[in-house]
Amino acid sequence: MKRTSRISAVGVLGALLVTATIIGAAFGQGEPVYGGSLSIAYTSTSPHIDIQATNQGSLSESAHYIYETLFDRNAEGDIVGLLATGFEISDDGLTYTFSLQSGVTFHDGTPFDAEAVKYNFERKISLQLPTWDSIPWDSIEVVDPLTVRVHLTAPAPHIVPVLSSKTWSMYSPTWAEAVGPDGVKSDGVGTGPFTVVDFRPNDTLRLARYEDYWQDGLPYLDEVVFRVITDANTRAALLESGDVDLALGLPVPVTERLKNDPRFNVQSALGARQYYMPLNNTKAPTNDVLVRQAINHAVDKEGIIRAVFLGVGAEVADAVYMTPVVDGYVPAGTYEYDPERAEELLEQAGWTMGPDGVRVKDGERMVLTLFTRRGSVTGDFETAELVQGMLADVGVEVDMQVLESASFVPAVTVPPEDSTYHMANLTWGTVTGDAEYVVSTIYRSDAAAPRLYNRAYYSNPEVDRLSDLSRQAATIEERNAIYAEIIPIVFADAPILQLFNSIEFLAANARVHGLYFEPAFSNWPGKYAWKTP
């Protein structure tokens, strides 16, 4: 007997519309109005708009306007059908049969059908980008125009969450074949509610309403314009002057001030992003678990949240790389702020206090190199400064090196033997909303940078063994039970300085309505957005 999951297209759309209306009401009430332009100031540079080639967070902010996936997540983080109406799973878990929406076209008029899905799956797999092999693909079969069947070599109960990630968006096969790998970077032809009018790398993305969009009555807006504004204060100034309608990634003091200004509405919600600092597990002295645990005890996370996020912009993380919105999340615990315990652990590791207040061992002073950026995400530099001071209090000197974004990412995406940092100031987002993404791309030994995102170069054979075992699980429940064993092991190994989970803020002009927060992807879909005149 096959297991069936049928998702009503009308029901899914209705649920999303209700969610959007409820949350949109927080931005103001009234009937949706057609027309107008929405201008959005967002944070990160975008050298291209080829979402299949990356999981870059800044692209996911705009990708859902242009492209769509088989599945999506609603405002509660639940998976719902989008271009798929349902699916069946064979008893052995090796075959998934997806039913597709009818009457959908790409922006160039190409029909969306099973052939298009097959093309996109095979294109995405052929790129062999990070996590491409987290699903054990065998073959993809077109059953009929609205049915596609995926054959696997092993069960993969996480396949639906993976396919909800924006990086599995559907491209027009006609267009993608015509323009080639370079052409898809500078344009976009999907099934989404908006078409690409103009893209200027690292500057502007201009979109227009797709008149033949398959969801009746949507979208409301005529135009959406994304502007890359890397400086948070400039984003705030543009919002307050009326030059943009929405601003992302504003400093918490700004959003707290705007809450009291009737010209604006501010929304906040816990997302899937975690602030953390990988501790280089291959480079002395952070290759010692006692040192890594000491660093975690030496840092006052609550104090940083009060100082940098005014007590409202983050919450202390209790699982390595995972927030509570992630499917498969299990709370593992926190390293309480305890400087005395930190000093005890450092003494146990052989690091004794030197005459200048810096610890020494075998004649070597304890100096850790910390790479950071300034303003890439809210509070990153301020957090780094506070960590530097707190570690100094227990005798650990931190050499903080501030890098530009263009050089920062390459510097922390090198093989372990080429790494020159002990710590790096980063954030992590679980872009599929599912714990498998964390386990496969950051917990495993074979996930070490530059292949994947394990920038701590963490390695534990028992974690690898359990991870392998989880990939044989037939159901999500079986898999999650194994993850419940893995997560505490990783926590005890302290591969990172585990900091806090981000509360995401959106500040909008009060004329903007219909936005809702999607926690798994930590973005604010605008399909239902509208503006009062």
Image (tube, helix red, strand yellow):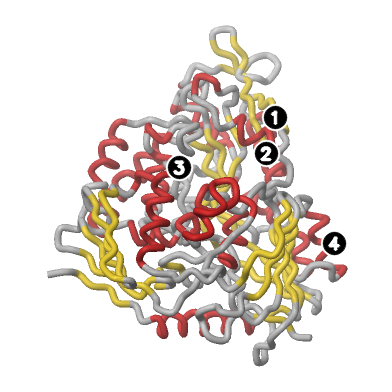
- Marked residue nearer the N-terminal end (4 or 2): 4
Residue sitting at the far right: 241
Distance from label 3 to label 2 (Cα)? 31 Å
Q: Which quarter shows the C terminus?
A: bottom right
Closer-to-camera residue (18/7):
7
The reply to whether callout 4 and callout 1 are in contact (CB within 8 Å) is no
- The residue that mark 4 highlights is 237
Label 4, residues with CA under 10 Å away: few <14, some 14-19, many ≥20? some
Q: Residue 243: x, y in percent? A: 84, 67
Closer-to-camera residue (155/294):
155
Viewer-side label of 4, 3: 3
Element type where label 1 sits in the image: strand
Q: Which residue is depicted at the point 46% across and 34% down? A: 451
- Marked residue nearer the N-terminal end (4 or 1): 4
Viewer-side label of 3, 2: 3
Distance from label 4 to label 3 (Cα)? 38 Å
Element type where label 3 sits in the image: loop
Q: Which residue is depicted at the point 42% across and 85% down? A: 10
- The residue that mark 3 highlights is 129
- The residue that mark 2 highlights is 384
In the image, residue 131 above or below residue 72: above
- Residue type at mark 1 is Met
Q: Which quarter shows the N terminus?
A: bottom left
Label 2, residues with CA under 10 Å away: few <14, some 14-19, many ≥20? many
Q: Which mark is residue 150?
A: none
Residue sitting at the far bottom: 31
